[in-house]
Image: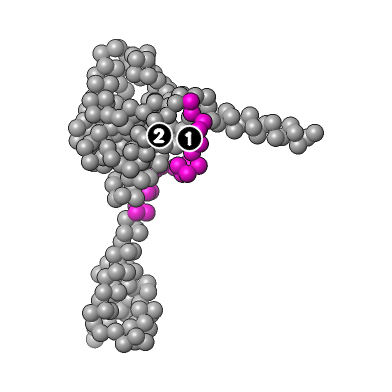
Amino acid sequence: MTMTMPLADQLTTLGLRATAAGLDDLVARATKQRWSPTPLLEQLATAEQEDRARRGLERRLARARLGRFKPMADFDWAWPKRIDREAVEAALRLDFLAEARNVVLIANQGLGKTMIAQNIGHQAVLAGHSVRFVTASQLLLDLAAQDSARALDRRLRHYGTRTSLLIIDEIGYLSYDSRNADLLFQVISRRHEKKSLVLTTNLAFSDWPTIFPNAGSAIALIDRIVHHADIIALEGESYRRRVAEQTLTKRRASRG
């Protein structure tokens, strides 16, 4: 005699997880409101669509690895001495993604370039795009750690074309040897005119030759980055330093 699986288990096997989880409530509502088959199926379809959208968002957020960040509502637009707010807000609207353009945020430490980049990434995730946030050092460590040409090519494809938006943070904080310069060049070349990049750097492009093994590699990178790019420069003093100084002043005042 064949044992029939409970209905909730059958629904789970079919991938209807939301319906399985809320089965008792759904049956009770259908009975109470005397639903015909069509409204019942409409409720089932709506619940499944909402559940899959929620789980898809959770997966994209996990894969993006944005880390903790403050929302743009907390950004002090008045603090930088120079900032193109219109350009930042256009980037947050993801205007650049449709044309595979890049966004480059140039600023000294503490002015919020990473925060802006993380918020751009978050907006892209909410819009349904695959996103990967990574520092330049993490990216290059990951690529350099691959133990075969096939494994390296797989990782280069991941960073190069499989991710809708790649955010590379902190270019310019470390110098690059020839190997790392080549790996970074490969990632950027694979995305050129195909997928968008968001880059943050503390160096003006004119200073990039100081961190690359030769001027030629720096020029080649810059050429592909700026070919289709919105360059957003922030100028001013460190916001984090201001907060630290204010905190110290408050502590001293409280001690009397």
Residue beneath disc 1: 77
Residue beneath disc 2: 85
Mark 1: amino acid: Trp
Packing grade of label 2 (10 A; few <14, some 14-19, many >=20) is few
Hey, which quadrant is residue 137 in on the image? Answer: top left
Q: Residue furthest left?
A: 193
Please name the residue shown 33% across and 76% down the image: 8
Q: Is residue 205 left or right of residue 192?
A: right
Q: Looking at the image, can residue 199 be seen?
A: yes
Q: For the residue labelled by badge 2, is the local secondary structure a helix, a strand or a loop?
A: helix
- The reply to whether the C-beta atoms of the residues labelled 2 and 1 are less than 8 Å apart is yes
Depth check: give the residue in front, 160 or 97: 97
Residue span colored magenta: 57-81
Q: Is residue 237 left or right of residue 200?
A: right
Q: How is the image coloured?
A: one colour
Please name the residue shown 49% across and 38% down the image: 75
Mark 2: amino acid: Arg
Please name the residue shown 35% across and 78% down the image: 26
Q: Quadrant of the N terminus?
A: bottom left
| Tag shown at residue 38 | none
Spot occupied by residue 102 in the image (x, y as percentages of width and height): 28, 32
Q: Residue furthest right?
A: 256
Choose the circle earlier in sequence order: 2 or 1.
Answer: 1
Spot occupied by residue 142 in the image (x, y as percentages of width and height): 34, 33
Q: Is residue 69 above or below residue 108?
A: below
Q: Quadrant of the C terminus?
A: top right
Tell me, yes or no, whether the highlighted magenta stretch contains residue 79: yes
Q: Is residue 1 left or right of residue 124?
A: left
Depth check: give the residue in front, 130 or 156: 130
